[in-house]
Image (spheres, grey):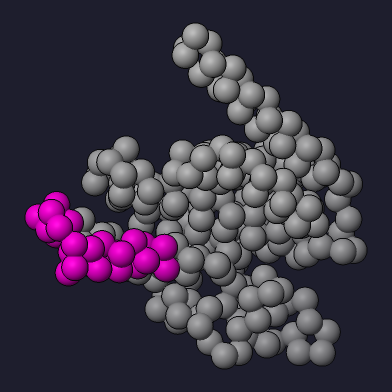
Amino acid sequence: MQQTLERQQLLFRILVTALLLLVYGFYLAHQVNLTVGDLGRHLKNGQLFIENGLISKVNLYSYAYPDYPFINHHWGSGVVFYVIERLGGFAGLSVAFIIISVVTFWIFINLATKYSSFAIAAPMAVIVLPILITRHEMRPELFSYLFGGLFLEVLWGYKYGRLGFRWLFILPILEIFWVNLHIYFFIGIFLVGAYLFESLVVFLFGKNQQNVRDQVKGLAVILLLTIGAACLNPAGISGAIYPFSSSTNMACR
């Protein structure tokens, strides 16, 4: 009887999750509108890199101030978009965008289910769905959502013993890609720092300090490696601190 009930609950979770993912994917299936989004600019950036090895350090698309210097954190996204467009056209870009977005949505639903409950995860997914579907243009921020979910997956897994310490070394590797794909890369550093801070508080005021001490040491190493990975961009340290510059407008990235 208990096994039958568990199977029914599992089937219910699978069906509801699949329905949420299908609805999300359906609403993302918009025709590419080059006049609204920045896709054309990103495709041109990708073309310049593929054909000439150029990562622009000035604003090539400004009529009033064409030589305005800036740090191009999303140049890698342009390369990815350009390669996909060359291989599959704009239809391929749309399909890739929908797949990555749906997978990212599933990662967060799965995280909420594992570390909270499906009874909380499903209603929250329904609540945020109308907000998510408003961002239906292919933009570099797509990768920030994905990497944010992957960072949480690894960090939560390590915290609760689902993943070993070696899995944490994936995070600096992901950070290298993230810093060259979108300006929200600093979120990865923040997430590692938040988990380190939590472990440090537990170490100072909690029990079983030996195990927590190892967590603190391990997360401190990963944090330093992740910060170092953020410097592996065309602008180096300047690029790593760029999101915190008062002149940075991250809303348009």
Residue at x 47%, y 12% (from the top left corner): 3
Q: Is residue 34 left or right of residue 224?
A: right
Q: Residue at x 47, y 69 (%)?
A: 186
Q: Is residue 85 above or below residue 17?
A: below
Kindly identify the residue that appears in the image at 76 percent across and 89 percent down.
65
The main secondary structure of the magenta stretch is: helix
Relative to 190, is 181 on the left or the right?
right
Count of numbered labels shown in the rendering: 0
Q: In the depicted view, which residue is nearer to us: 228 or 7?
A: 7
Give how far across and how far down residue 248 sits, in percent.
Answer: 61, 84
Task: Note whether 209 is above or below 114 in the view shown.
Answer: below
Magenta extent: 190-213
Is 203 in front, or is 145?
203
Q: Residue 222 falls in which quadrant of the image?
A: bottom left
Residue 18 x %, y %: 68, 29
Residue 198 position within the rendered picture, expressed as x and y whole percent measured from the top left = 31, 64
Q: As rendered, which of 212 and 52 lies closer to the eye? A: 212
Q: Is residue 154 above or below residue 92?
A: below
Query: Residue 93, percent across and down?
Result: 75, 44
Residue at the (23%, 63%) spot, across then down: 202
Left or right, 228 with respect to 140, comes to: left
Q: Is there any visible trace of residue 12 in the rendered image?
A: yes
Q: Is residue 196 magenta?
A: yes
